[in-house]
Image (tube, rainbow, N blue to C red):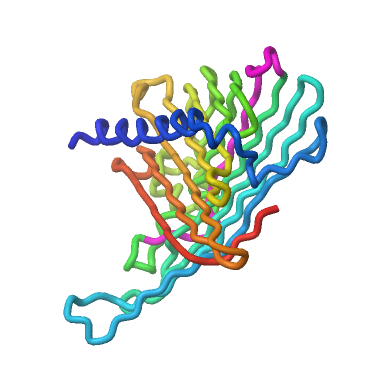
């Protein structure tokens, strides 16, 4: 299947998810378990932190395979401010995971730092003029396993910063849509060896790449059916140059199912398409059982 067709199919899935969730009566009637408002005006906060584990053990298994053990840490938190017609929404999302197999020893399978801040002024009950700042990078070095000698990424290589002026649509506390016709995307490759090689989209010897384009962010944070929490964020960017229409995509989805007071099952996925990283769709899915704490 053509790569662009596949990309837009995934995009449609993400957008239809947001739309269908908004039209579901239960999502409108239930108050989000992650959002605890301190007052009508002022600061409100929400968050979830957890650790999940997975394990596979094989003994004389005819079909073959490896013994594996994995562990992942997730953290999502928000701090939002509202006063009269002014608002300021902040969200931090972080994730780190490792996996051990009998063939390849320890490997990294998840690594993310994301900070988003949106501030603006309401011009109607649901629309606002706003400014967005979004930052993404990772904690540690990444490798093209099983090669562990040469790293292909590291902290601040790459790092992405999006600065955008536009409009925010917020029909309720669960959904946010930000649209910007004027956005600046900055790609950082601050590692000397990766910069010299011209990796991750920068010119050889350069450490920063600037792109002007259009930007969209759609996010949802809600509880459905009482014990299932969903946090979804979709980011799209296309530059105003010869690559216009070639969309950078990042869609993060976290589904949290509260089994009982002690245990929680989580599904954590990321769909990603960045030409500067790889010219193919990237997809990561982690399903685990562990402990979570909401605050």
The answer to whether residue 137 is magenta is yes
Q: Nearer the viewer, residue 152 or 180?
A: 180
Residue drawn 70% across the image and 23% down it: 120
**Relative vertical location of residue 133 with respect to residue 284 in this rendering, above or below:** above
Quarter of the image for residue 174 reads top right
**Quadrant where the image shows the N terminus:** top left
Residue drawn 46% across the image and 63% down it: 288
Q: Nearer the viewer, residue 240 or 264?
A: 264
For the image, the number of numbered tags is 0
Residue 191: x, y in percent? 51, 52
**Relative vertical location of residue 211 with respect to residue 282 in this rendering, above or below:** above
Residue 33: x, y in percent? 64, 46
Q: Is residue 63 left or right of residue 83?
A: left
**Relative vertical location of residue 258 with respect to residue 167 in this rendering, above or below:** below
Residue 152: x, y in percent? 40, 56
Q: Nearer the viewer, residue 170 or 203?
A: 170
The answer to whether residue 86 is magenta is no
Residue drawn 34% across the image and 21% down it: 242
Q: Residue furthest top?
A: 123
Residue drawn 38% across the image and 68% down it: 148
Quarter of the image for residue 57 reads bottom left
Residue 167: x, y in percent? 60, 19
Question: Which residues are the magenta region?
Answer: 122-143
Quarter of the image for residue 164 reads top right
The majority secondary structure of the magenta stretch comes to strand
**Relative vertical location of residue 256 with respect to residue 215 in this rendering, above or below:** below
């Amino acid at each position: 299947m053509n790569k662009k067709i596949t990309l837009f199919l995934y995009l449609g899935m993400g957008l239809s998810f947001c739309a269908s969730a908004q039209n579901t009566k239960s999502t409108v009637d239930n108050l989000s378990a992650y959002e605890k408002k301190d007052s009508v005006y002022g600061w409100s906060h929400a968050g979830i932190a957890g650790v999940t584990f997975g394990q596979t053990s094989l003994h004389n298994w005819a079909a073959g395979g490896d013994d594996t053990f994995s562990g992942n840490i997730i953290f999502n938190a928000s701090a939002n401010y509202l006063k009269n017609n002014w608002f300021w929404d902040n969200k931090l999302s972080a994730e780190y995971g490792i996996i051990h197999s009998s063939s390849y020893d320890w490997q990294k399978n998840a690594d993310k730092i994301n900070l988003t801040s949106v501030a603006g002024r309401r011009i109607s009950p649901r629309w606002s003029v706003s400014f967005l700042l979004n930052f993404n990078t990772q904690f540690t070095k990444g490798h093209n396993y099983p090669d562990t000698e040469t790293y292909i990424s590291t902290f601040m290589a790459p790092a992405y910063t999006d600065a955008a002026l536009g409009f925010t649509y917020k029909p309720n506390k669960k959904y946010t849509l930000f649209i910007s016709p004027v956005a600046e995307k900055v790609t950082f490759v601050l590692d000397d060896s990766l910069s010299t090689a011209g990796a991750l989209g920068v010119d050889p010897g350069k450490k920063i790449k600037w792109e002007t384009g259009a930007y969209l962010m759609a996010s949802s944070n809600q509880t459905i059916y009482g014990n299932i929490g969903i946090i979804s964020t979709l980011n799209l960017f296309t530059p105003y140059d010869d690559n216009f229409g070639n969309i950078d995509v990042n869609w993060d989805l976290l589904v949290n199912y509260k089994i009982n007071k002690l245990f929680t099952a989580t599904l954590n996925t990321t769909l990603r398409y960045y030409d500067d990283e790889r010219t193919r769709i990237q997809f990561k899915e982690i399903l685990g059982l562990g402990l979570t704490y909401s605050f």
